[in-house]
Structure formats: structure tokens, C-alpha cells
Image (cartoon, helix red, strand yellow):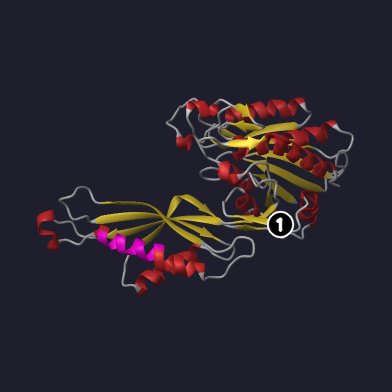
Amino acid sequence: MPSVNPAFLPEGHPRAGERRVAEFLAATAAQGGLDVELKEALPGRPNLLATLSPSAAKRHRLLLAPHLDTVNGTDDQFEPRIRAGRLYARGACDTKGSIAAMMTALLNVAASAQRPKQTEIIFAGLIDEEIGHSGASALVKQGWKADLAIIGEPTRLQLVTAHKGALWLELRTRGKAAHGSCQERGRNAVHEMAKIVDVLETDYAAQLKKSRAHPLLGRGTINVGAIRGGTQPNIVPASCVASLDRRTIPGETLRSVRAEIQALLRARGLRAEIVETQSLHCGPMETDPKLPLVRKLLALTGQKKPAGVTFFCDGAVLAGGGTPSVVFGPGDIAQAHTADEWIDLSSLDTAVRLLTRFLQDLP
């Protein structure tokens, strides 16, 4: 059932949007006795909230929060195939495996006699994780908070308490246009940017490798992912733009990263304007592994200590809104967005078993 983030498709494309999946899950949840609400986060794109109320007075709240959107793919990638114990399809691990496991576990609890007495459990199917985290942001703006949110992402069933953040920045250099036959009259913005890119990918990358390491996440990283400059060969380019992906660890901020880059460029005699893009700014996440619910889930997974991941997700957004968050789900991030994305079916069964047991043991 396609639910491609509309940012990856032309307007009106039949695969675009999360609504069809949200409505299917809403109907499934309602049949299982859950209270259901579709709440728009963006026009025509609702978050799904499916709630299991406690048997007595509510004193606690838990969120199960996978995202509903996927990246795009070819036609055949939307035709699911089972082979050698794996399900192949777009979104199988990122994150429809988590959606299926979390919804199934919640319905198992709703149908059982072992139901939490004081804990409200909400399945929050969120939109737009792949691009702007609009679903998670809407939840925060609407005032939703919980004792814990379990973010559904492919972690190989490892409990994750920390993830890196991501800053997408643009560097802009300015030159002076001139005819290519008398280039000495101009100032080449692309050449200036080339020197800056070399400094970032060598000196700055080396500086980060020597910086403070987080115990679960390691160090921050830099990648120059795109560069655009000039118009044609016989014109000295007057402008150039480079797009950067800077992965951050707890303690690093937009302000501190900008200051680092500006200081490095000044020291090398280089000049560029640093601009924060509107496309992505997700902070890092770090949750105390000693929180009672985190310890309980960690014990169920059999891990000696929690894990960290280098990708970012909705966890940082919900944590920033006051809800301690962890990341957990079947599948491997290495399979996400690939041409043959798959999930191991046995990992789905294990996820359902672990989550069902965890939810039934809530107070």
C-alpha cells in the first residue's frame, strides 16, 4: 500500500501521501477496540492516533511512534514478494515492519485479559519523517507528551537511546562575472568554493576525527554532497553554492557548528556565507538509559547496554518536546531505501513478542 512522501513525487501522483495507509490502520485499530483519531499534520496528510485506554484511572502514557511515509521506488518495488524468509518491498523495513509489529502488539494487548491498569498506550503513526518531521512536530505543538516514546525504526531489535543529528547547510561564494577570454577581469566563485571544499573534506574532517567522542555515537562528520556554480564555459562564474551534511552529536548545535566552520575558513583566508537551509535540521537525541521504562525494555531485549545509531529520526523531535524517546524495531537500516529493500519475517515475529510482553507488563 504505497505511502510515498509527496516531496519525492510530482503533485497528484497516485502513490503520494500517507492517507491511505493511515485510513487502513485506523479501520484495523477500530475493529480491535482502540479509540481512533486521524489528526491532520499537513493538509491532506493526517497522523493516526489509536489509543488503548487503561482499565483504571490513567497515570502514565506510552507512545508507539513509527512513521507512515516512505521514499519512492520503481513499480516492481511496490509489489511485495516473499523469498527465503524475507519480505521484499519498498518500505518493508523503513518502517512498515515497525508499523505492523507495533500495531499487532497493541491489538494483542487490547484483546487479552492482561491489560495495563494505569497506562494509556497510543499508537502514533506519523507523517513526513523522511523529509521534515512534520508529523512529530505537529504532535509536539498539539501538546502531546508521554512517559516514553518508542520510535519505530529498523534497529535490528536493538534498543537505541541515542542518535546523531543532521544539519544541512549551504556555503555561498561570490565572485565577479567576466568574459572567458579575459578572465583576469573577473573573480572565479567556483575556484574559491573548490578551495573551501578541499579544506572541509580534509582539514575539517580531520579536526572532527580528533574531537570529543560520544560513547555511543562516536564523533561528528562532514559531507559535501552537492555543488552548483556558473552558467557556461565562457563566463567567469559570479556565484557558487555547496550543500553540506553535518552529522552532530549531543552537545553540538547549529551555532557551534557555524562558528567552527567560519573560524576554519578565516584561518585559511577563505570567505563564504553560511546559510541554514529550510529542508532539514534535526538535532541529536540522547535518553537516560536508567529511566525505569527504558531499563525494562532493555532487559527484554537481552542487551547489556543500549545502542546508538548514526541516522536521525523522529526521536529527537519528540524528545525535544518533553517526551523521553528510544528507537526500536525490526529490520536493518542497511536495507532502507535500497533497490531490494527487505525485512526478515522472523524479526517481525520477535518484535511482536517482545513488544506485546513489554506492553502487558506496564503498570
- Left or right position of 57 against 13: right
Name the residue: 72% across, 44% down: 63
- Left or right position of 26 against 234: right
Depicted 20 relative to depicted 196: above or below: above
Q: Is residue 68 shown to the viewer in this render?
A: no
346 or 79: nearer the viewer? 346
Name the residue: 81% across, 42% down: 359
- Left or right position of 24 against 114: left
Mark 1 nearby-residue class (10 Å; few <14, some 14–19, many ≥20):
some
Mostly what secondary structure, the magenta segment?
helix
Name the residue: 13% across, 63% down: 184
Where is residue 333? Give x, y as percent. Answer: 59, 45
Which residue position is annotated with label 1? 306
Q: Quadrant of the rendered structure where residue 57 is?
A: top right
Depicted 30 relative to depicted 231: above or below: above
Q: Which residues are magenta?
A: 191-201
Which amino acid type is marked by label 1?
A: Pro
